[in-house]
Image (cartoon, rainbow, N blue to C red):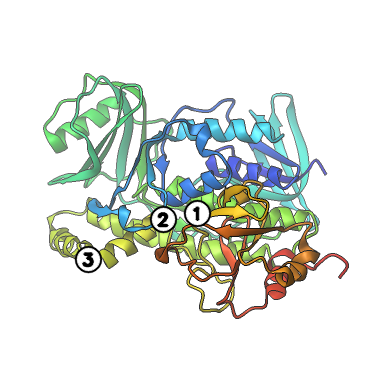
Amino acid sequence: MDAAVIVAGAGPAGLMLAGELRLAGVEVIVLERLAKRTGESRGLGFTARTMEIFDQRGLLSRFGEVETSNVGHFGGLPVDFGVLEGAHQAAKSVPQSHTETVLEEWVTSLGTDLRRSHELLSVKDTGEGVEVAVRGPEGEHTLTARYLVGCDGGRSLVRKAAGFDFPGTAATMEMFLADVRGLDLEPRMIGETLPGGMVMVGPLPGGITRIIVCERGTPPQRRTTPPSYDEVAAAWKRLTGTDISHGEPEWVSSFGDATRQVTEYRRGNIILAGDAAHIHLPAGGQGMNTSIQDAVNLGWKLAAVVKGKAPAGLLDTYHGERHPVGQRLLMNTRAQGLLFLSGPEVQPLRDVLTELIGYEEVSRHLAGMVSGLEITYDVGTGTHPLLGKRMPRLALRTAAGRETSSTELLRAARPVLLDLEDNATLRARAAGWADRVDIVTATAQDVSAASGLAGTSAVLVRPDGYIAWAAPGSHHDLTMALERWFGSPLGA
């Protein structure tokens, strides 16, 4: 075979997946139709959970100085994300083009075979692997791999060619997005609802202004080219009464409110991630972030299967865990669309929700939903409050006296068994997995009551940063948890 895994698409999801696979030593080819990055930035910024993921992989420093904020919204209604203790703040105004540049440099440094100007033509699952027909600079040819992952966007060829069902609702309106120079507009970071629709304004680096125009009553169009800036300026004037026609557009695009999700994230040797698996209104900046998190959930599981170190059914947990996340994503973006884009008939609902957001528990719930911090996977029953949840950052001092953290221990994208009580018996029970699980003895520093880790003697953290087992509080035995997620021990 040409590689263990072929990834279609070099957007954020495809690049993140390639990086995860390369960290595990898996050979991967990334096929990208475009000769170079477009420079367009539909995605803008990172949620708190994506900030954690990048921190766990040591990527945050590659982005340079990043502006962060705890100010967020749900459907245009302000929400204080600062109620989420112990979490990163969200990153603001990081263009997707910069994210893709950083991720491409990272995966290239890890030895990823990234092939630009390579267009996928057809896909075949042979049962033993996949065959893909590709058109590249030197003509058409066939590549083979054990698995193919479609990270090729909302119009995914992989999804269509492999026959995935993609039910949902079609777009009901068309909206505009543009990055423009030469505008002096008052920021409307979470949007402003107007009688005819909604507008949003955000300053970007380099004197560029991001504008979004959502005018009610504009039916979706089948475009083969982007809309003109004249259309954008005309819609802006109808909504706001302000003339922005003098602006100089960097790029212009349109989008709709279609909402769809595949019924299965995997069919045999073909897997989908990111927009290929789910499309929705881009409310709250969740699309790119959810796509990156799809890739991180899938990457270590796919690598374990390819390397023959996975228990039966591990790859099935990708759909089992991420499909419900996608369902909640579609639910909350549709709800936000109703709040954002409906007319005055929805104002009473906005008023009631504004009152509810004043209660910290409601703010915490909505902030957790939009940020991705609420996600809980089924790792088995137990009473520990963090079972199945993401591991918060915990300052540590190892037995050798080295200062580190739970975040830094995940740099290599390997699972970590963290022994917090110098328990030799615990370490002996896990010794059979030492080839694939890092066993670390350390003392926790400054454990807060809010962290959920108070009184914890040990945790087993998956490579994606989620807690698979904890003591005390897990009803599963440690060896059961190790076998469930990381296969049989050596010599078994």
The residue carrying mark 2 is 86
**Which is more toward the observer, 7 or 165?**
7
Query: In this view, which residue lies farthest toward the right?
Result: 491
Q: Nearer the viewer, mark 1 or mark 3?
A: 1
Q: Please state the horizontal and vertical placement of residue 76, each as a whole percent of the image.
A: 24, 50
Q: Please state the horizontal and vertical placement of residue 253, each as a whole percent of the image.
A: 37, 33
Label whose residue precedes the other's in the sequence (2 or 3): 2
Which of the numbered marks, if any, corresponds to residue 359? 3
Q: Residues within 10 Å of mark 3 (few under 14, many from 20)?
A: few
Compared across the picture, whether 437 is left or right of 286 comes to right
Which of the numbered marks, if any, corresponds to residue 393? 1
Q: Please state the horizontal and vertical placement of residue 490, each as a whole percent of the image.
A: 84, 64
Identify which amino acid the numbered label 2 is placed on: Gly
**Mark 1 touching mark 2, by CB under 8 A?**
yes
User: In the structure shown, which secondary structural element does the residue marked by tag 1 occupy?
Assistant: loop
Identify which amino acid the numbered label 3 is placed on: Tyr
Up/down of 415 relative to 33, above or below: below
